[in-house]
Amino acid sequence: MSTLDEIKYRAQAPTPPFFQKLKRVGFMVAAVGTAVLTAPGELPEILLTWAQHCLTGGIVLITVSQLVVDQDYSKLKMLS
């Protein structure tokens, strides 16, 4: 199985419940970072830096959580 096929398989496979919750947290963190970055007006540089880190961390958390595969589903796929 090629790397792209593996990523496609993992993206479409069911995600375990813990990682579904973790993905929601990632969405919230990324949303806060985006809201601060797109806020009108002047903001302190430290706040903008913090928002950039929140956005990056949220996106990484979402991506990793999406690509985790339920172990039972993975075993079923291997058998078929």
Image: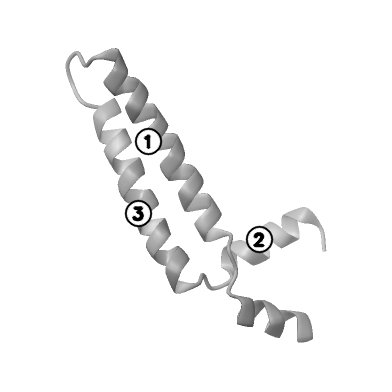
Query: Viewed as shown, does residue 71 lie left or right of 26?
Result: right
Q: Is residue 45 above or below residue 31?
A: above
Residue position for label 3: 25
Q: CA distance from mark 3 to mark 2?
A: 23 Å
Q: Quadrant of residue 67?
A: bottom right
Residue at numbered disc 1: 54
Q: Quadrant of residue 74?
A: bottom right
Tag 2 residue = 8
Task: For label 3, count other residues whose C-alpha is less than 10 Å away and answer few (under 14), some (14-19) or many (20+).
Answer: some
> Percent position (x, y) of residue 11?
59, 62
Q: CA distance from mark 1 to mark 2?
A: 26 Å
Ranked by sequence position, the earlier of labels 3 and 1 is: 3
Residue 12 percent location from the top left of the image: 58, 67
Count residues near mark 2 (Cα–Cα under 10 Å), then give few for <14, some for 14-19, many for 20+.
few
Picture coordinates of residue 57, whole percent (x, y): 44, 40
In front of the other: 13 or 18? 18
The kind of residue on which mark 3 rests is Val
